[in-house]
Amino acid sequence: MMLPEKGHLLRIFIGEDDRHEGKPLYEWIVHKAREAGLAGATVLRGLEGFGAHSRLHTAKFLRLSEDLPIIIEIVDTLDKIEAFLPIIDGAIEEGLATIEKVEIRFYRSGKKR
């Protein structure tokens, strides 16, 4: 798969405890992104954050998880990202999604041509 030099980044902010169809929401979104043929997705777990309700979510020494922030990043063309958003929109009850322009320097699978 080739990507153009000018791409877009979809960044989705949700909670670690968010679920959809019986599985973690971040996992469901990544699987849907793969099914949609997007270039790739990465899930990042935050140490601390807050969202629309201003409720602080944090990792403390004695508590391993307090519904920590999850960030899902997906890079592809704007057309493919815009087509993907309606697929996941209804599954995200609480969260934030942003799109920004990115410059794609390379996209490699590691396979020799």
Image (cartoon, helix red, strand yellow):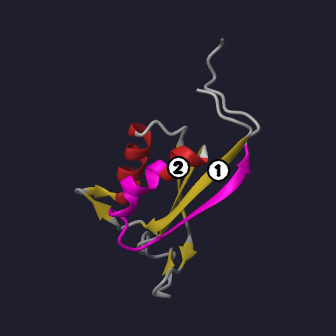
| Badge 1 amino acid | His
Tag 1 or tag 2, which sits nearer the N-term? 1
Q: Which mark is residue 81?
A: 2
Q: Residue at x 30, y 63 (%)?
A: 19
Q: Which residue is mark 1?
A: 8
Does 12 sit left or right of 88 as displayed?
Answer: right
Q: Using the image as rendered, state which of residue 85 and residue 9 is in the foreground.
A: 85
Provide residue 3's location: percent of width, then percent of height: 65, 34
Q: Work out how far the residue at label 2 is from the one at label 1, CA to CA, in angstroms.
A: 8 Å
Q: Residue furthest bottom?
A: 54
Would you say residue 11 sits in the magenta stretch?
no
Q: Quadrant of residue 85?
A: bottom left
SS type, badge 1: strand
Quadrant (top left/top right/bottom left/bottom right) for the C terminus: top right
Query: How many marks overall?
Result: 2
Q: Residue furthest left?
A: 22
Q: Using the image as rendered, state which of residue 9 and residue 49 is in the foreground.
A: 9
Quadrant (top left/top right/bottom left/bottom right) for the N terminus: top right
Are the residues flagged by discs 2 and 1 in contact, CB closer than 8 Å? yes
SS type, badge 2: helix
Does 87 sit left or right of 52 as displayed?
Answer: left
Q: Using the image as rendered, state which of residue 40 and residue 49 is in the foreground.
A: 40
| Badge 2 amino acid | Ile
Provide residue 50's location: percent of width, then percent of height: 52, 80
Would you say residue 90 sits in the magenta stretch?
yes
Where are the magenta residues, as a range? 83-103
Q: Residue at x 56, y 59 (%)?
A: 11
Provide residue 16's location: percent of width, then percent of height: 41, 65
Provide residue 5's location: percent of width, then percent of height: 74, 38
